Image (cartoon, coloured by chain):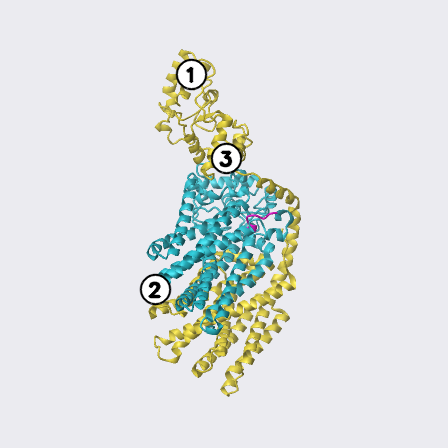
Amino acid sequence: MLVKPLGGELLRGLLFVSFYLHLSFVLLAIGTAIISLFYFLGNRGDKSTGEARWDREILRTFMAHKSLAAVLGVGPLLLIQVGHSVPFFSSIGLWAPVWMALILLLIVASLAIDVLGHRIRGRRSWHLGLGIIGLASFLGVPAVFVVVLVTAENPEGWFAIIKNNFRLAGPLALHWLLRYLHILGAAIVIGAAFHYLFSKRKDSRKDSALSRWLVIGILIQFVLGPLLYLSLPRRPGAAANLFLLIGVIGAGLLLRSVYYLKNKGRAMGIKTLAPISALVLFFMLLTRQTLQDKTFLPLEREYQAKAAIYEKTLGPFRQPSVQKYQSDLDIVYDRGAVIYSRSCAFCHGDAADGDGPEAKNLAVPPENLSAVRTDRRTLHKIILAGTPGSGMPYFSFFDRSKIQGLMDYLDQKWGVLGPNEPPPGPVPQAALEQAQKIYDQTCAQCHGQDGRGSRQAQDFRPSVPDLTVYNLTPQRTFAIISNGYPGTVMSGFSAAYSEDVRWGLAKIINDKRK
Amino acid sequence: MQFPIFQVPYLGNGLTIALDGIVHVVISHGFAIGAMAIIVLSEYLGFKNSSRRWESFAKDFLRFSVIIITGVGAVTGVGLWLITSALSPRSIGSMLRVFFWPWFLEWIVFSLEVSVLLIYYFLWDRWSAKKKKQHIRLGFSYVLLALFSAVLITGILGFMLTPDGWPWNKSFWAAFFNPSFLPQLLLRTGLSFIMGAVFSAGYCLATRRDADFRREALRLCGKVALVLFAVTAVASAWYLQSIPSRFRTHAAFAILTSKLSQHPELFYLINAAGALILVAFALLSLRGSSSILRALLVPALLFSLGFVSEFERIREFTRGPYLMPGYMYSNQVLLEENPFYNEAGLLKNSFWFNKTTDNPDPIKQGVYLFAQNCSSCHTISGINDIKDRVQGRTEDGIYVILGHTREMVPFMPPFSGTEEERKILAHFFFALSEGEIKLGAPSRFAPLAGSKNE
């Protein structure tokens, strides 16, 4: 097993910093999309008012926010996957389809909103459609991430999710919903704060509109926050409570500043407001990570201990398996001899006598290849398609040159592509005549008068061989006539006919192949 | 470590990753490196020759490219990660442990790259006149960052094909600077610029009306492409040499698959035709003959796409039985786990299977054995359907074959599980192929879901 490249405080520190960066831009991007689309809808095609252009001004920054959100997200993803592999990957596994749908959601959202932001030709209804599609897809993204995190942080809920047909239910579902809404609220706050603080302060109407957004956003958070707090699956602990408290106080200050003080004409400047907003986010995210660590850290310890035991269990297998890998690497499947020994011999045997180590496990025994006599085309067909009704598989996973090489090897070694061979001794004429009668009456029922197989045998599996292109050495043919072919319809005739007659049959059958 | 198994129904996991990957490679190579280099070059030419036409070409093409790069390129890049962490969590988890620091560095480079791109884009108008030089320098530094990003990723991808001594010594440097690293980097760079040139020529043909300028711009694209053809040809040969012959010998099959494996001439013919069309496109660009180029544009784009897909497919496929050679099989079973499972049993040691179902039903067991052993490549009722693969075989034949997949098929991993489990799987496959069990296209295996179990 591989060693974790980093852990402990370094990992958690990096995770926090990268997540903070990532989430800042995520919230900016979502907030920007929500606010600008709101103005866009509010305008209803009235391009004369000043407000009409706000959506555009705000939306123009979307491309930067969402791009940075996406790339910065790689960092925390990397860190959480390394640091908390088991809960995180398990959760992703449970949510695999929606998790992968993120890609589509993100592509649709960014293309739709970017095209809208660039006003690339088209009619207003078109724009409206783009905006709605873009925003809807974009708002789906945090929903997925939240469900993955909620699941990862609550391993005791995993099997309930499976039992519930891969859906979240009960208190965890409520927790998920509140957490999701809380993120949208945060997005409105951060988005409004950004545009409020960094937009050109000439337009007083825009200024007050944005500060209204900010106030509404913070109020939403003040309502959602306590509910979310109540829905937490476990007690937050002192540290988390402290961080949360600081965050809440900061948010209160922010609210006071943009609402009360501003009405009295004593609004704080950007130099005070921006750091306060950043600090509020900082403490809120610190709360989040502290809560998360409460499950992740003990889990991590538990899995580390389990991994160490497993590592020990696998110990004896380690060295041999790498050795096997190394020796396998030297086996190149580009020559007939190699392919035969690797892909064929375990059934057909090293001597191609059909007696490989697996032959005993097969009801239809592997063919004695050294006795096969056929032509290249027929052999190629058999190798490509296999023999249905037996264990013989298809080998089309070797390309043509490899199969040609295999056939050359079979021919060189065992004369598989050789001509017909005559029986070892002469067959008496009378026996031959009797054999012909027997063939016509008995054998032809399946093999057909011409040796190509009769209609009645069409559906046999394994099918009847086409004797005009495929046969065996006379000795082998004789053996099959005498003893039958196990696992097939072909039965043995040693009791029924004399040896001479069976040799006669072997000759007749083999002569079918020209 | 085991994770819930999910399979993309019908499509299968490999193809899902490939679809996202191809889009990403085309954009990250063709646009983020190739086209962007030509854009910066065009801006430079506009500045040097005080040409409004070069300047506006660069600016318009940049807007188009930035939307594509940030909206689709970056997302599909992150998407590769998202998909693999859902479909192949153990492999991405292990890769992360080996290559955490390059990936972490890549994250910083990637973030810088996108930031510089955005600054370059948003400051185009503001950094004009006196600051133009600075702006151009910013553009070049973006291209360098993008190339550096490619360096980092290529080390990791090269490892998956040629891990060199890593399986023995677990040395990071051997893993990163592996034998296929340099040739692959060169090859990817070549492909990037060729694609960039084709995309730029396409954009020029589609948007520029001024015939004189069009000729000039096309000539630039043609030059870039021709020079990089030479580089790519050398790099391809070098790259192929760096692949162990055990893997390389499946290169043609990777493209042809079982359907066309007996017609290898097709493989060579189509590759030759593609190279010919791209060279012709570059030569005609040099001459600036717009009308023929317009006709060739779509084939040239398709073949660029084809070459990229071919390159990635061969890279992914030929290493066959391994996800991480010398460490992990393609079904996410560790090399050292296979003999362990063969002794101790796979199902007994399957965390999710044991937790989610107490069903001793052999069919359910067969399904899960399939999930663990086969589902990273095979589907039920989809692409590379396991039913087709075992069709016509007897149950004992399937049992025997399952015990020899690793030797019989040079790119298949071995079966993991006891002989008893192998029997269960063989029976399941046989029943499936005979139609005794009818399954839709399951996406979950424990409990079986996403299918109609009749």
Label 1 crowd bin: few (<14), some (14–19), many (20+), radius 10 Å: many
Instruction: Count the marks.
Output: 3
Percent across and percent down for residue B140 are: 50, 64
Magenta-drawn stretch, dominant element (helix, strand or loop): loop
Q: Amino acid at mark 3?
A: Asp
Percent across and percent down for residue B99 are: 59, 55
Q: Is residue A426 left or right of residue B351?
A: left
Q: Amino acid at mark 1?
A: Gly
- Between A110 and B348, the one lying in front of the other is A110
Percent across and percent down for residue B266 are: 41, 42
Q: Residue furthest front?
A: B49
Which SS class for mark 2? loop
Residue ID for mark 2: B210
Q: Amino acid at mark 2?
A: Asp
Q: Which chain is depicted yellow?
A: A
Q: Quadrant of residue A40?
A: bottom left
Q: Is residue A448 left or right of residue A426?
A: left
Q: Are marks 1 and 2 on the same chain?
A: no
Pointers 2 and 3 in contact (C-beta within 8 Å):
no
**Chain under label 1?**
A
Percent across and percent down for residue A22 are: 54, 67
Q: Residue at x 56, y 54 (%)?
A: B155
Q: Which residues are magenta?
A: B158-164
Judge whether A116 appears above or below B193 on screen.
below
**What distance separates the C-alpha of mark 1 from that of mark 2?**
89 Å
Residue B396, numbered label = 3
